[in-house]
């Protein structure tokens, strides 16, 4: 009996392990899918004073209003692996000269030193800013003003030469290497539109093939999760059937038809006597007890 209980406890542990493995696999798959997208962030609460890790790209937009923290808003971005950042500011309209948009190298609280980029009401177009760091901090000093708007695009990149074929992602025409999941996402992540062209190497015509860019990741994640769930369901069914078989074997051994037919007949084993349910008393320990009267 103890061996049977030990086997059941092991089966329960196996079942719990399989279930938690499936849950972890699904969560990891979904997290990879989210990390693979260009994140659109409005520089107001709750984005302000936050750190976003392992992002391949992000678009930060100025969003004045009551949700912007007083005086200042900071956002820190961290790139995955060995990627570093390149940044470009577009559609800048700053009418209040007290509003300043700054870019700092690294995560420093608070950012100090000279900013790599500074945009205000009289600033010219800085072009593309290449940062040799995997972490950047964007600071918006707004002085409670609402007369501004901008769009800052940050893309994680690896620089490759024409002779180098170890990009591992999508290779832009300007030889920047970016994540394949950024292709055809309506954002110019290469800063030369090569990842968004319909007749270039990215093939962004949605009518030709439904599984483009990050959609492949979605398909693989769904199929992988379905496969793991199917295997887990089959294992659970097998364990349940085996457990029922063990219970049936115990019944055949102790209470089966052969026991009733032969053992009880020849008085080798006395049949169990049922207590009279009418003579049930409540003991001092708070539990129900039967008296010695049998039926």
Image (spheres, rainbow, N blue to C red):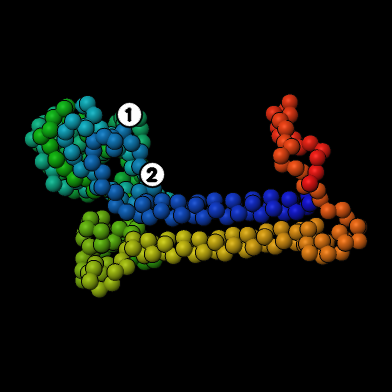
Question: Would residue 20 appear left or right of 253 to someone viewing this image?
Answer: left
User: Where is 248 relative to 111, above or below?
Assistant: below
Residue 52: percent from left, percent from top: 35, 42
Residue 257: percent from left, percent from top: 78, 64
User: Where is 263 relative to 111, above or below?
Assistant: below
* Mark 2 or mark 1, whichever is nearer to me: 2
| Element under disc 2 | loop
- Farthest residue, direction left: 95
Q: Residues within 10 Å of mark 2 (few under 14, many from 20)?
A: some
Q: Which one is earlier in the sequence, the residue at label 2 or at label 1?
A: 2
Question: Would residue 241 appear left or right of 79 to someone viewing this image?
Answer: right
242 or 35: nearer the viewer: 242
47 or 98: nearer the viewer: 47
Q: Name the residue located 80 percent from the left edge and 57 percent from the top edge.
A: 254
Figure quadrant of residue 152 = top left
4 or 199: nearer the viewer: 4
Q: Residues within 10 Å of mark 1 (few under 14, many from 20)?
A: few
Residue 64: percent from left, percent from top: 16, 35
Q: Name the residue located 37 percent from the left edge and 51 percent from the top edge.
A: 35
Q: Could you tell me how far apart the alpha carbons at marks 2 and 1 are, in whole angstroms?
A: 18 Å
Q: Name the residue located 72 percent from the left edge and 32 percent from the top edge.
A: 281
Picture mark count: 2
Q: Which residue is mark 2?
A: 53
Figure quadrant of residue 195 = bottom left
Q: Which residue is mark 1?
A: 110
Question: Would residue 34 appear left or right of 129 to someone viewing this image?
Answer: right
- Farthest residue, direction bottom: 208
């Amino acid at each position: 009996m103890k061996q049977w209980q030990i086997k059941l406890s092991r089966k329960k542990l196996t079942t719990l392990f399989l279930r938690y493995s499936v849950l972890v696999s699904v969560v990891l798959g979904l997290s990879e899918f989210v990390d693979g997208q260009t994140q659109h962030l409005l520089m107001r609460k709750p984005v302000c004073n936050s750190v976003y890790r392992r992002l391949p790209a992000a678009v930060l937009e100025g969003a004045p209003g009551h949700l912007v923290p007083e005086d200042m808003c900071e956002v820190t971005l961290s790139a995955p692996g060995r990627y570093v950042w390149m940044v470009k500011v577009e559609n800048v309209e700053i009418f209040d000269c007290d509003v300043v948009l700054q870019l700092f190298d690294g995560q420093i609280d608070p950012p100090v030193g000279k900013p790599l980029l500074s945009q205000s009401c009289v600033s010219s177009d800085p072009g593309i800013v290449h940062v040799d760091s995997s972490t950047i901090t964007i600071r918006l000093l707004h002085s409670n003003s609402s007369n501004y708007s901008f769009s800052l695009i940050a893309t994680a990149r690896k620089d490759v030469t024409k002779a180098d074929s170890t990009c591992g992602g999508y290779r832009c025409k300007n030889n920047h290497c970016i994540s394949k999941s950024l292709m055809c996402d309506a954002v110019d992540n290469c800063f030369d539109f090569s990842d968004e062209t319909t007749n270039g190497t990215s093939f962004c015509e949605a009518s030709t093939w439904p599984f483009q860019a990050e959609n492949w990741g979605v398909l693989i994640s769904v199929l992988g999760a379905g496969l793991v769930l199917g295997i887990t369901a089959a294992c659970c069914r097998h364990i349940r059937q085996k457990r029922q078989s063990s219970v049936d074997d115990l019944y055949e051994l102790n209470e089966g038809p052969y026991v009733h037919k032969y053992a009880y007949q020849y008085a080798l084993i006395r049949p169990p006597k049922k207590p009279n349910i009418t003579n049930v008393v409540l003991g001092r320990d708070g539990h129900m007890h039967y008296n010695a009267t049998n039926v």
